[in-house]
Amino acid sequence: VGGWWSARAAQALPEAQTLKGLGAPPAQGRSHWLALGLIALGVALAKLPAIRGVPVAAYLSVACLLVGGITALPWLIALLYDRIAPLLSRRVLPMLAIERARRMRGTAAVAVSGVVASLSLAVALTVMVASFRDSVTHWLDIVLPADLYVRATSSGRGGNSGAESSTDTATFAPALVQALSRLPGVARSGTLRTRSLQLDTAQPAVTLISRHLEGGVAQALPLVGRALPVPEGQIGIYVSEPMVELYGARPGSSFAPLSNALAPAAGGAPATFFVAGVWRDYARQFGAIAIEARDFERLTGDRDVSDVALWLAPGASEGAVQEAVRALAAQRAGSEVEIASVGQIRAVSLRIFDRSFAVTYWLQAVAIAIGLFGIAASFSAQVLARRKEFGLLAHLGFTRAQVLAVVAGEGAAWTAIGAVAGLGLGLAVSVVLVKVVNPQSFHWTMDLLLPWGRLLALCAAVVAAGTVTAWMAGRAAAGKDAVLAVKEDW
């Protein structure tokens, strides 16, 4: 397709002028309508649902946005530089650089198209990773409010006062939980119980989380939106975002699959569960349901817990409390427990996150390097074709440094347009990635965060690298051969 497109452009060249070295591709006045059409198509595709769980339309949307943005480059060059050119009319070197970008819009667009594509993807990845990390950090702040977290291990021997094994995880009996809350240095405690539920044989199991919500649902769970009042006679549950997509558990509706899976311990009619809110959960991709601990105990008769959260008293030693917890668990249950501080959990979680996305920074560097190679190849080819032009400048009195300054200025002017277009397209693509691709792929959402400092530094680095690349490509054009090349017209 690229060869066919170039051949079509060559057909439009004027034959006589081209043979004399004066030919130039005609300006395409309607290219901006094609660009606007592609961008509009990209916006429309971004609103379509996924196909069998794959965001195909969103991927096509990204492609349309990129192609549309690159197609709009000649129009963008004219829009900006037609207004900047009069300001530089009395400064020769900048004027020559700007005028060439204005007059050779198609050539400039081809030269920087690789930079635009690579920079836009780098910007999109930067915004997506920054948004995800910021959302995970806020999520950890809400789901980890305590100072210490104690988890029962599967090696417990069981017993009414120790860590008991269940079909899902090892648990603590209520007596041990009460003993933990009375330890010196512990101000208060909280409990959590998880159970795996198979709501649909065609879907992976979901996690049922039983916890106390007296302090307010918004303080205990990272809600998306607000919590709804629970109708009388029904039991309120709070579902994670994947539950909405996978099971249709929308706020304000009753959730029958849980009624069938969680039958009352003493028999009788199944309970009616009301979806009172939706919350973010980055730990369980296939869904989780949070329920008030009292409701869970009343329905199942199960009072054991799998995790205990401990808030330390002011001035208490974290190490001493951990030793006391281990000693109490060994005395009551004859087993070990897992203990972690909130700082340790946060540090490990964020370190795993950073390792998972570290490759994206290398991909950004590779993509931008490929775009800069495109600029180097384009300028190198132009330098060979413009030897007479540079020789004429030398005859007019331009020094070698001034000729190189003109070439570097052209590189700066072209890559500056590429940086502006790449930044704008990257922000548009990042919105598609954050708001469409991520929810359709993983069924959870995140808040959009724009790290302006990092993005502007990335654009500035691209402009600087493009300028240096053009300067290096133009060094061969400012030699003595360029001066002699003028004789070819004599």
Image: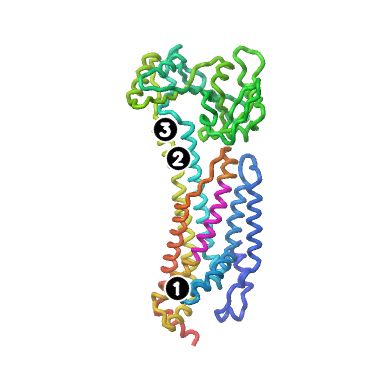
Above or below for 112 versus 14:
above
Q: In the rendered structure, which amino acid carries the disc numbered 3?
A: Ile
Q: Quadrant of the N terminus?
A: bottom right
| Residue carrying label 1 | 406
* Residue 141, image x, y percentages: 46, 35
| Residue carrying label 3 | 345
Tell me the tag on residue 353: 2
Figure quadrant of residue 240: top right
Distance CA(mark 3)–CA(mark 2): 12 Å
What is the secondary structure assignment of the residue under circle 1? helix
Above or below for 126 versus 267:
below
Q: First in sequence: mark 1 or mark 3? A: 3
19 displayed left or right of 311: right
Q: In the rendered structure, which amino acid carries the disc numbered 1?
A: Val
Residue interval drawn in magenta: 414-433
Q: Residue at x 65, y 43 (%)?
A: 49
Q: In the rendered structure, which amino acid carries the disc numbered 2?
A: Phe
Figure quadrant of residue 181: top left
* Residue 174, image x, y percentages: 47, 15
Which SS does the magenta portion mostly show? helix
Q: First in sequence: mark 2 or mark 1? A: 2
